[in-house]
Image (tube, rainbow, N blue to C red):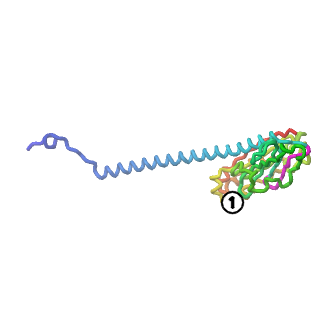
Amino acid sequence: MTFLNGSPAGRPLRRAFTLFELLLALAVTTIVMALLFHLSASTASVVQKSRAKIDLQTTARSAMDRMSLDLAAAVLRPDLPPLFVKNEGNDAFYFYATADGYEGDRGISAMGYRIDGNEGHLYRGAEGTGWAQQPLSFSSHLASTPFVQDHPNPNFGLLGMNVFRMEIEFLMRDGTYQSVATPAHWEDVQSLIVTILSIDPGLFQKAQGSPGELAALFPDPPADADARALWAQILKDPAFLAGSANFSTSVLGGIKIRQRAFRLSP
């Protein structure tokens, strides 16, 4: 019997894949999928880092914007002066403003900003005074331990997570710069300068040290320097960025500085 084209009735032969070819195809597919997975993971990591950086910048900027709104509404009367608290480490400041307290009181509220050293977060206080109901009888100087020192407090709200360091300084009306002490007379202050340090929460979770230990790495500025210049120099120091047992290079490299000047108009 004669076969055409090597098969009965002239039908072509059907050639199946060999085991070697199947294994080769499987290997190539595995490599391609691994490359795609790596590319996807790298892209997700870049997106996550970019998003964290944007969130960090947004948090710091929003905190400064809130300060700006409150200070623009500040009541700077001679009999109701603001209170600037210069500490070794994180500073604080308090004042009265035509703003609502957290409990909704209208009229005048006692305002304040400070860092919780244990948590490493920036808090804002806003306590209604009831001044609108008794304008003639209300008059009270802010104490050295104002309401926002007590926490938790219904008049005390979280403003900036992982804003772990705050320094206040003063531009005086005579053009001089004061950074080491509270002015004897607040009327001599032209602008309040606030400098803050913040860090991405994801990076801080990798740290071994506490928020207070991290804040301690950034000392108070001397009389002839401002906090931003001093801290920027620290963050550029290779020895500092080399890291330590408590704070790795990646953690220290994620710290950001923001500074703003708020003009005071009595």
Residue 87, magenta (yes or no): yes
Residue 169 visible somewhere in the drawing: no
The quadrant of the picture occupied by the N terminus is top left
Task: Give the quarter of the image for residue 135.
Answer: top right
Q: Where 171 falls versus 117 (above or below)?
A: above
State the residue lying farthest toward the left. 1
Specify whether residue 141 is in view: yes
Residue type marked 1? Gly
Residue 97, picture quadrant: top right
Residue at screen point 70% across, 49% down: 160
Q: Is 250 on the left-hand or right-hand side of 23? A: right
- Identified at 62% across, 52% down, the residue is 202
Question: Neighbour class for label 1 at 10 Å: few (<14), some, many (≥20)?
Answer: some
Q: Secondary structure at mark 1?
A: loop
Judging depth in this view, the residue of 163 and 248 nearest the camera is: 163
Q: Give the camera-side residue of 168 and 250.
A: 168
> Depth check: 56 or 250 in front?
56
Residue stretch rendered in magenta on the structure: 78-90
> Would residue 14 appear left or right of 93 to someone viewing this image?
left
Q: Which residue is mark 1?
A: 209
Which residue is found at the position 77% from the left and 46% from the top?
A: 101
26 part of magenta stretch:
no
Image coords of residue 222 (percent x, y) = 83, 51
**Residue 21: x %, y % from top left:** 31, 49
| Residue at the extreme front | 133
Q: How many marks?
A: 1
The secondary structure that dominates the magenta segment is: loop
Quarter of the image containing the C terminus? top right
Give x and y (percent) for residue 125. 77, 49
- Which residue lies at the image location 35% right of the left edge and 48% below the top edge? 25
The quadrant holding residue 149 is bottom right
Q: Give the side of residue 142 with respect to residue 160, left or right.
A: right
